[in-house]
Amino acid sequence: MSTELPAADAEACCRALRQLIRSGAAATPSLEQSPLLQLPVVSQRCQPDARPAQRAQIFLAVLRQVIRGRLEGKEAQIAALLFALEGYSGLPMQERYRAAAKLHNPRGSWEQYRKEPLSRHLAAVYLALTREADLPAAETAVKPQPRVLIVQNISREGPGLLAKILDEVAVNYTLINLSKGNVFPDPTTYSALVVLGGPDSANDATPKMVTEHSRVKQALDAGVPFLGICLGLQIAAKVSGGRVVKGVKEVGLRDATGTPYSVSLTDIALTALGKKDPLFLGLRNDFRVFQLHGETVTLTPSMQLLATGRDCHNQIVKFSHNAYGIQSHFELTPEMLQEWLQADPDLTPLSEQHVLAEFAELEEIYTITGLSLLRNFLHIAGVI
C-alpha cells in the first residue's frame, strides 16, 4: 500500500516544514497541530490513542533520524541548521537562514536562497520522511523515548521551569525526593540526570549525601548528561576532584549593598570552538540571577569555568562535553519563590513583598533566560 500523500497534503506538509524553521522544530508550540503528525511514518510508530504531544516527539525523533541517516553531506547540515537541531539549537532564525544560504552558495544571500533553493531543500526533507515509511522496521527503528531523572534534596526546591519544558515536549521524567527517603536509582538507566539544590552541604557525611556522591560520580563516569543546580553543582565538583568551601553568602536578588546579583560569561564560554558554548546559545553574555548559597567550589584543571559572579566567582562550571553545574537559580517560578520566601530560614528575613515585586518586574527576561538555558541543556543531552 502506497504511503504517499495526496498532492494537497504534500503541499501542506512542506508549508508546515517551512513554519518549523521560525522557532526551531523542537521549540515550535504549534507542532502538536501540524499536518506533519499525520505522516504515515509517524502513525507507524504511535499507539492509536497517542496524544498530540507524544506524536510530536515521535515526529521529532524521525526528523532527526532522517537528517542524520538519509540526507547526505551539505543537505544534512543545511536541514539541521534550518530546523535548529543537533548543535544548532538556540540559534536565532536569521542566523540559521544566513548560515544555510552560505552553505548552499558561499556567494549567495538569504534573499536569493529563500526564492527557490529553500523550497528544494524542504521538499528533499519531506521526500525522505515519506520514504521512511516504506523501509523495513529494523532499518527505521526509533530510539526509546528519553527519560530524565530529577533529584530533589528538599521538597520546596523543585524543578520549576525544567518541569514546564519537559511537560510541554512530552518527555518523561522521574522526580525523586531524597528528603522524603526516596531511593536514588541507577542514573545510567536514564537519558539525563539533574540534581537540584537544598540545605545540605556537599561536605556532609550523612548516608544521604554519601549515596548522592556515589550516584552522581557513577553518572559522570558513565557519560550520562548531567546538570547540577546549586548543591548539585557542589556535589559534582567534589566527586570530580574539586573542593567545596565556605564562600560569600548570597541570598535573594541583591547583595547587602543593594547590587543585583548577576553572572557574566567568560571568554571560554564565548569562544569555545569558535562560538558560544552550546549551553548559552541564544542568550546574552550576562544575566540577572537568584542566589541562595553560602558555599562555593574550587575547580580542577580539567573543569572549565564558563560564567562568573562578582563575589562568588565560580558560577557556571563545565565538567565534560555534556555535564554542567550552575551555582545560581534559573529554574524559579513565582509560586516557588513565594514558598522559598516563607520557608527558607535564609530568606525569611527578607521582605517577601519587595522580593516578589522585584521578581515580577524581571520575570519575563528571567524566565526567557531560564527556559533557554534549560532547553539548551536538554538539547545537549539529546533529550529534545
Image (tube, rainbow, N blue to C red):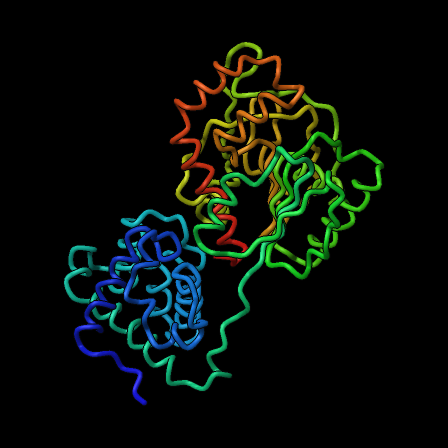
Residue at 32% across / 78% down in the picture? Answer: 130
Left or right: 338, with 214 as reference point: left
Left or right: 204, with 102 as reference point: right
| Placement of 231 over or under 357, stated as above or below | below
Q: Which residue sits furthest top? A: 257
- Counting from the top left corner in percent of width and height, residue 105 is at 24, 63
Res. 65 image quadrant: bottom left
Q: Quadrant of the N terminus?
A: bottom left
Front residue of 30 and 119: 30
Res. 56 image quadrant: bottom left
- Counting from the top left corner in percent of width and height, residue 188 is at 68, 59
- Counting from the top left corner in percent of width and height, residue 284 is at 41, 35
- Counting from the top left corner in percent of width and height, residue 349 is at 61, 12
| Placement of 278 over or under 306, stated as above or below | below
Residue at 68% across / 33% down in the picture? Answer: 198
Left or right: 98, with 259 as reference point: left
Q: Which residue sits furthest bottom? A: 1
Give the total of numbered labels.
0
Front residue of 352 and 76: 352
